[in-house]
Image (tube, rainbow, N blue to C red):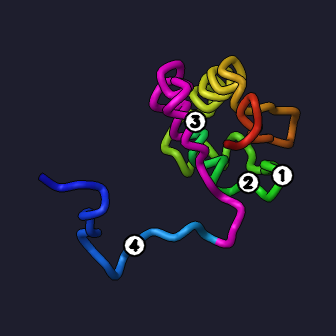
């Protein structure tokens, strides 16, 4: 039986490292069931925003640019934003998006 100590990466030369940039995804997004309250479109938007946000979670991407990058209509981006706002994952005040810290701070 394999234990955690026995685990080896499949591709040793491709072991993921935490990047020096600002993008990251908090594991509590899954553990605390945030993902279960959002559509695939909303989660795609969230991942994109997390990736492009600065150290404070801020981004200035336009809805039109986001729609083009994500292959969505602008109205779908707005619907996805509404889901993320309802889930307390992002805040938006034109033209600034903010990826919010999950309740309780990073753990």
Residue for badge 4:
15
The disc placed on residue 56 is 1
Nearest to N terminus: mark 4 or mark 3? 4
Q: Marks 4 and 1, Cα distance to the nearest angstrom?
A: 27 Å
Residue for badge 3:
28
Q: Nearer the viewer, residue 9 or 22?
A: 9
Nearest to N terminus: mark 3 or mark 2? 3
Task: Write the residue at 68% across / 57% down.
Answer: 52
Nearest to N terminus: mark 3 or mark 1? 3
The disc placed on residue 33 is none
Nearer the viewer's eye, disc 1 or disc 2? 1
Q: Nearer the viewer, residue 20 or 85?
A: 20
Q: Is residue 67 above or below residue 21?
A: above
CB within 8 Å, label 4 to label 1? no
Q: Circle 3 — which element?
A: helix
Residue for badge 2:
53
Q: Circle 1 — which element?
A: loop
């Amino acid at each position: 039986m394999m234990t955690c100590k026995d685990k080896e990466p499949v591709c040793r030369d491709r072991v993921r490292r935490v990047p020096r940039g600002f993008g990251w995804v908090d594991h509590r997004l899954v553990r605390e069931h945030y993902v279960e309250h959002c559509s695939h479109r909303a989660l795609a938007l969230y991942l994109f925003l997390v990736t492009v946000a600065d150290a404070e979670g801020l981004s200035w991407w336009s809805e039109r640019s986001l729609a083009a990058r994500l292959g969505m209509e602008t109205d779908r981006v707005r619907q996805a934003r509404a889901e993320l706002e309802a889930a307390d994952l992002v805040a938006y005040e034109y033209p600034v998006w903010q990826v919010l810290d999950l309740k309780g701070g990073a753990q």
